[in-house]
Image (cartoon, coloured by chain):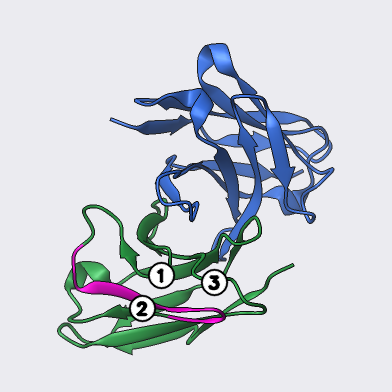
Chain colours: A blue, B green
């Protein structure tokens, strides 16, 4: 069974750093891209970026480029989303999702449960 | 960047109704259009990919159509569990989501 299990909720102060995780199981981790999606509470979905675990090739939404870093640890089958200096506006729910490869149309077919990040002084 | 615009933003309907949600892309995206359903407190769920292909396990009352810039999601006979928020997503050039359509019980 394919599963993406994300790390737990975080409460941070502005300026602090943070790295959240997404552990994959039930499939070959290195052969499916994994994306990250933000949802500000009560708002819509925003695609942040995507990474190919096979070679760590990462692509970013220009809006989030330079604000976050996406990485993987192949030995742990885990993807990460990292901030070096959080802002209050980073408050939101962050989802990881696997990109389907069968169709060629690249939807996200499996999602993590989401991780709530709260940034407040 | 490709922009995705959904309409309506919200919709009230009754169990058994047929409803349609529209998604328009700011440029042609062929059939690179996906639809997701999200319920409160839950992750999005893939319903339709490639504009009209039903994801495995999704009931057949859901259907999608369109190509180029204009797309629709149709639910043929609303069930109580269908009241949720629906998002379109283009996957032609990286990804962009529409702003969502909240489907509420009338």
Q: Which residue is mark 1?
A: B85
Closer to the camera: disc 3 or disc 2? Answer: 3
Rendered image quadrant of residue A28: top left
Magenta stretch, overall SS: strand
* Magenta-drawn segment: B59-71
The verdict on residue B68 being magenta is yes
- Going from the N terminus, do you reach mark 3 or mark 2 first? 3
Across and down, in percent, residue B44 comes to: 42, 55
The verdict on residue A101 being magenta is no
Q: Secondary structure at mark 1?
A: strand
Callout 3: few (<14), some (14-19), or many (20+) C-alpha neighbours within 10 Å? some
Q: Which residue is mark 3?
A: B30
Q: Which residue is at 21% across, 81% downward?
A: B76
> Can I make out residue B95 in this image?
yes
Task: Judge if badges 3 and 2 mark residues of a common chain.
Answer: yes
Q: Secondary structure at mark 3?
A: loop
Across and down, in percent, residue A46 comes to: 62, 58
Say which of A57 and A77 sits in front. Answer: A57
Q: Secondary structure at mark 2?
A: strand
Q: State whether residue B3 is above or below residue B17.
A: above
How much space separates mark 1 and mark 2, taking CA atoms?
6 Å
Callout 2: few (<14), some (14-19), or many (20+) C-alpha neighbours within 10 Å? many
Q: Which residue is mark 2?
A: B103
How much space separates mark 3 and mark 2, taking CA atoms?
27 Å
Closer to the camera: disc 3 or disc 1? Answer: 3
Left or right of residue A57: residue A33 = left
Q: State whether residue B7 is above or below residue A29.
A: below
- Going from the N terminus, do you reach mark 1 or mark 2 first? 1
Q: Which residue is at 37% across, 56% downward?
A: B46
């Amino acid at each position: 069974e394919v599963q993406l299990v994300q790390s737990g909720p975080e409460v941070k102060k502005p300026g602090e750093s943070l790295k959240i995780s997404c552990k994959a199981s039930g499939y070959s981790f290195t052969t499916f891209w994994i994306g990250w999606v933000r949802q500000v509470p009560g708002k819509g979905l925003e695609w942040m970026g995507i990474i190919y675990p096979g070679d760590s090739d990462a692509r970013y939404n220009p809006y989030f480029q330079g604000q976050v870093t996406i990485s993987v640890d192949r030995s742990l089958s885990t993807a990460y989303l990292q901030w070096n200096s959080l802002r209050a506006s980073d408050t939101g729910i962050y989802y990881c999702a696997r990109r389907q490869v069968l169709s060629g149309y690249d939807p996200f077919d499996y999602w993590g449960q989401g991780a709530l990040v709260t940034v407040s002084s | 960047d490709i922009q995705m615009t959904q309409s309506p933003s919200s919709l009230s309907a009754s169990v058994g109704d047929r409803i349609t949600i529209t998604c328009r892309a700011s440029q042609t995206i062929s059939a690179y259009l996906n639809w997701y359903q999200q319920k409160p407190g839950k992750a999005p769920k893939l319903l339709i990919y490639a504009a009209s292909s039903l994801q495995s396990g999704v009931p057949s009352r859901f259907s999608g159509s369109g190509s180029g810039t204009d797309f629709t999601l149709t639910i043929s006979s609303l069930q109580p569990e269908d009241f949720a928020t629906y998002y379109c997503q283009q996957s032609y050039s990286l990804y962009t989501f529409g702003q969502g359509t909240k489907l509420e019980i009338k």
